[in-house]
Image: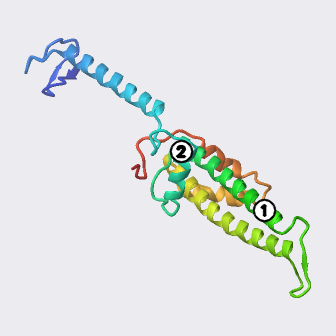
Amino acid sequence: MEKYCWKCGKKIDANAQFCTNCGANQNQQATAQQQNYQQSNYMQSQAVAMPYNETRTPGLIASTKLAFKDTFKINKCMGRADYWWSQLGMSLLFWGVNIVVFTLIAVTAGGLGTFDSGSGLDSFGVGMFIWIFSMIIECILIWICSFTATVRRLHDAGYSGWHYCWTIAGAFCFGLLSVVTLVLTCLHSSYPAKWPRP
């Protein structure tokens, strides 16, 4: 039985400790391969232990700012912590703005509203129209930001942004298919990345 020398590539006896052509120690090959294997395993374990996040310290404010800054960018990645912090930030912002606007309308309209016989409009009704209109605009802006953040998060997990279609399809089956997108956004960052990481 024969094997090949790890250094020069010549055939040598399977039990030989040294190459007959170049004199290389054949035990060094096993040691080098073992070190490469251990180093490779260490690097892979560090990749999982140190996930990608564009903000160095993900948090409510920093991650929400990042999501709004990258609202119209989908060809990149967004780390898991940045994604979930930004989703929380956008939800709090949405409800906070709506509560403040609704409260201001209720206070300025006198609570129950006053009827203006000249115009035929109830001031509270006009206020409600303004609140509903502002809420629709806010919903559209936050949905766009959330959509692009989800696509970037899917990219970071190693999946195509087209997987967001599960969420859209979920609207037609009581949200059941939305669970697919939810699970994919919870996965670790994939290495190597298929999309750019700044």
Q: Quadrant of the N terminus?
A: top left
Front residue of 126/133: it is 126
Residue 154 seen in this snapshot: no
Q: Are marks 2 and 1 in contact (CB under 8 Å)?
A: no
Q: Position of residue 92 (x, y in %)?
A: 68, 50
Which residue is found at the position 64% from the left and 50% from the top? 181
What label sits on residue 102 in the rendered view? 1
In three-dimensional space, the C-alpha distance between marks 2 and 1, rounded to whole angstroms, equals: 30 Å
First in sequence: mark 2 vs mark 1: 2
Element type where label 1 sits in the image: helix
Which residue is found at the position 47% from the left and 50% from the top? 77
Check disc 1 and give the amino acid type.
Answer: Phe
The residue beneath circle 2 is: 82
Nearer mark to the viewer, of 2 and 1: 1
Q: Position of residue 43 (x, y in %)?
A: 38, 29
Which residue is found at the position 88% from the left and 64% from the top? 111
Element type where label 2 sits in the image: helix
Q: Is residue 196 left or right of residue 31?
A: right
Label 2 environment density (alpha carbons within 10 Å; few <14, some 14–19, many ≥20): many
Q: Is residue 59 above or below residue 72?
A: above
Residue 87 seen in this snapshot: yes
Front residue of 44/101: it is 101
Q: Quadrant of residue 133?
A: bottom right
